[in-house]
Image: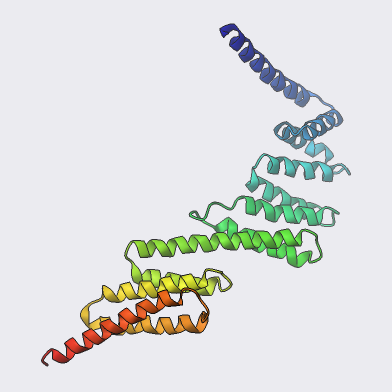
């Protein structure tokens, strides 16, 4: 059993060593055409790391030759297929700068935008690349309105918007959970403006009402009536915006509470001697 394992390990080491020696031997060859043939073989076999090394090595020789465009095209894809999306985006961009009239222009423009999209992180993290992906995808749509890729580009933009919405929703909810109710109310209200087509718009408005109510509850006595009135005003806006919302009754509860509190506070003020 142990001998079998050792044999397998040795075989694995020999394969790795052999591969290393093989590409080193190719790199030492003075024949660029031979290197190109080998790079193409590696590319077809999806050994993109080796293909990338060889393409990079022969680029100076082919830079002024017709083959250069195809070499650079595959070189960019080598980075993409190895999930080096930052480098891939840069290479796709450079391809367009070097070959602006290429028949592959539409494909490469799309792949540049898609490389930004692939760099988009989970919602909790910085969304700079998500915003960039949306911008570059929209530019692609504007540049190639009849492209068969437009539908996918639009879908990706919507996915990115969904990710931005998720990030903002989590941030607003965090304010609420931490007891920063005024900040939460403002954040949820801003989401209504940022994502007017969201299916969760009425839920965001309800959360803003809840947050304003909690903010009023925690206020100093002389500010409470004014802030409970703010809750009532927000409810009226809710009804105007979402007259058919299933959440209307939930929102109305905070109006009832606010009106009750205003009445109680007003009576107390009347009883309090001047």
Q: Residue at x 73, y 32 (%)?
A: 47
In this image, 135 relative to 240: left or right?
A: right
Q: Residue at x 71, y 48 (%)?
A: 91
Q: Using residue 69 as the reference point, say whether residue 205 is left or right of it.
A: left
Its colouring scheme is rainbow
- Residue 116 position, x and y percent, is 64, 53
Q: Quadrant of the N terminus?
A: top right
| Residue 30 lies in quadrant | top right
Residue 161: x and y, percent?
59, 63
Instruction: Pinpoint residue 239: horizontal percent, then vertical percent.
Output: 47, 82
| The quarter of the displayed image where residue 130 is located | bottom right
Residue 87 in sight here: yes
Q: Of 22 and 116, which appears nearest the observer?
A: 116
Q: Quadrant of the C terminus?
A: bottom left
As displayed, is residue 141 above or below residue 268? above
User: What's the residue at 79%, 52% (across, down)?
Assistant: 98
- Residue 261's place in the image compared with 140, above or below, is below
**Quadrant housing residue 102:** bottom right
For the residue pair 18 and 45, the one nearer the viewer reads as 45
């Amino acid at each position: 059993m142990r001998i079998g394992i050792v044999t397998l390990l040795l075989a694995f080491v020999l394969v790795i060593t052999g591969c290393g020696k093989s590409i080193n031997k190719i790199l030492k060859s003075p024949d660029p055409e031979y290197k190109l043939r080998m790079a193409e073989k590696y590319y077809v076999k999806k050994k993109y790391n080796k293909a990338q090394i060889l393409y990079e090595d022969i680029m100076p020789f082919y830079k002024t030759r017709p083959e250069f465009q195809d070499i650079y095209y595959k070189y960019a894809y080598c980075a993409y297929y190895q999930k080096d999306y930052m480098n891939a985006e840069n290479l796709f961009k450079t391809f367009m700068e070097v070959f602006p009239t290429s028949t592959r222009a539409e494909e490469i423009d799309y792949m540049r935008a898609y490389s930004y999209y692939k760099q988009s992180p989970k919602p909790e993290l910085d969304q700079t690349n998500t915003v960039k992906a949306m911008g570059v995808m929209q530019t692609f749509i504007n540049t190639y309105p009849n492209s068969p890729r437009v539908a996918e580009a639009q879908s990706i933009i919507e996915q990115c918007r969904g990710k931005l919405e998720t990030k903002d929703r989590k941030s607003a909810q965090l304010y609420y959970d931490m007891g920063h109710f005024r900040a939460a109310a403002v954040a949820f209200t801003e989401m209504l403006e940022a994502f007017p087509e969201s299916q969760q718009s009425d839920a965001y408005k309800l959360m803003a009402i809840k947050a304003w109510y909690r903010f009023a509850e925690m206020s100093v006595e002389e500010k409470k009536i004014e802030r409970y009135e703010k809750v009532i005003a927000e409810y009226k806006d809710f009804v105007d915006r979402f007259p058919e919302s299933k959440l209307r009754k939930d929102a109305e509860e905070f109006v009832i509470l606010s009106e009750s509190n205003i009445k109680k506070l007003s009576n107390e003020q009347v009883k309090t001697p001047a």
